[in-house]
Amino acid sequence: MRLKYAIGNWKMNGSLAEMKHISDIASAASELSAIKAVICPPAPYLSAALGAAGAHIGIGGQDCHMSEKGAHTGDVSAAMIADLGARYVILGHSERRTDHSETDAQVSQKAIAALGQALTPILCVGETRTEREEGRADEVVRMQITSSFEGISDGRKVILAYEPVWAIGTGLIPTMAQIADMFAVISEAVSFIPNHDQISLLYGGSVNGENAAEIFALNGVDGALVGGASLTSAKFAPIMQALAKS
Ligand code: PGA
């Protein structure tokens, strides 16, 4: 059984006052037992978010270092995220890959560090617009999966998010046929991972309350990683509800 996830990535947004949106999201989620909702706030707000979340939603980080501790100014370890009581961490998001030149090899090391602290890594992959226009989207995503998931020994403990880079924050989304085709490629590409049939596969990139139901109806899509539309319950609850109905 693959769990259905609605995961909110707050990126570098939010404030202490805005933790009330997490409480609102948690109360909307409390009526939806068929899905797992998770919010990933910026690291300084993890504790406050955990307080606001209660038992109905999970809380996660947006990145972690591959080392447990040491001289890495500005970084946060998986152990620290776990120590607070968070249970998830987004890894290899395209904004990390672009802004911090993160490589697939680093993403794989971070995932192994996260698993070592019993965090569930949410590993992100996805092609750029140029790569899609050049007809290389399938090949790029396959390679990212092969390298970023290297060393992962149990598919039940990880989540994969396919996020076409050109769809993130742009309001553009692939056609339903393009998403379905890519999910078929992904299902094949993860087959080297033990228990790969248990990996929840999410779509991300401009998901909102209007397009969510259509995306969740696609074969193999187990949920979504959501940026902008996860910042308030008014926007995120319709996505969680669409997932619960799918
Ligand atoms: P978006 O972001 O929903 O705002 O497009 C998705 C993401 O980057 O995870």
Image (tube, rainbow, N blue to C red):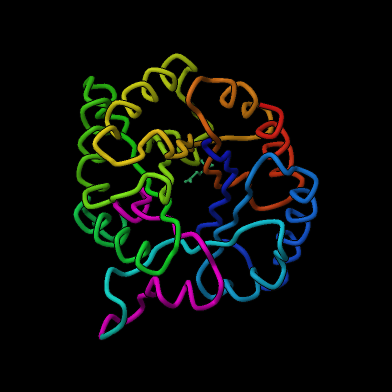
The answer to whether 50 appears left or right of 132 in the picture is: right
Magenta stretch holds residue 157:
no
Q: Residue at x 66, y 56 (%)?
A: 57
Q: Residue furthest bottom?
A: 71
Q: Residue furthest top?
A: 177
In the rendered image, residue 23, in percent from the top left (x then y), is placed at: 76, 61
| Numbered-mark total | 0
In the rendered image, residue 213, in percent from the top left (x then y), is placed at: 65, 25
Residues in magenta, as a range:
71-98
Nearer to us in this view, 80 or 97: 80
Looking at the image, residue 240 lies above or below residue 54: above
In the rendered image, residue 131, in percent from the top left (x then y), is placed at: 24, 29
The answer to whether 221 appears left or right of 188 in the picture is: right
Magenta stretch holds residue 72:
yes
Nearer to us in this view, 26 or 193: 193
Q: Residue at x 45, y 14 (%)?
A: 177
In the rendered image, residue 240, in percent from the top left (x then y), is placed at: 68, 40
The answer to whether 38 appears left or right of 133 in the picture is: right
Looking at the image, residue 22 lies above or below residue 52: above
Q: Residue at x 31, y 82 (%)?
A: 69
- Which quarter of the figure has residue 212? top right
- Which quarter of the figure has residue 35? top right
- The quadrant the C terminus occupies is top right
Nearer to us in this view, 188 or 94: 188
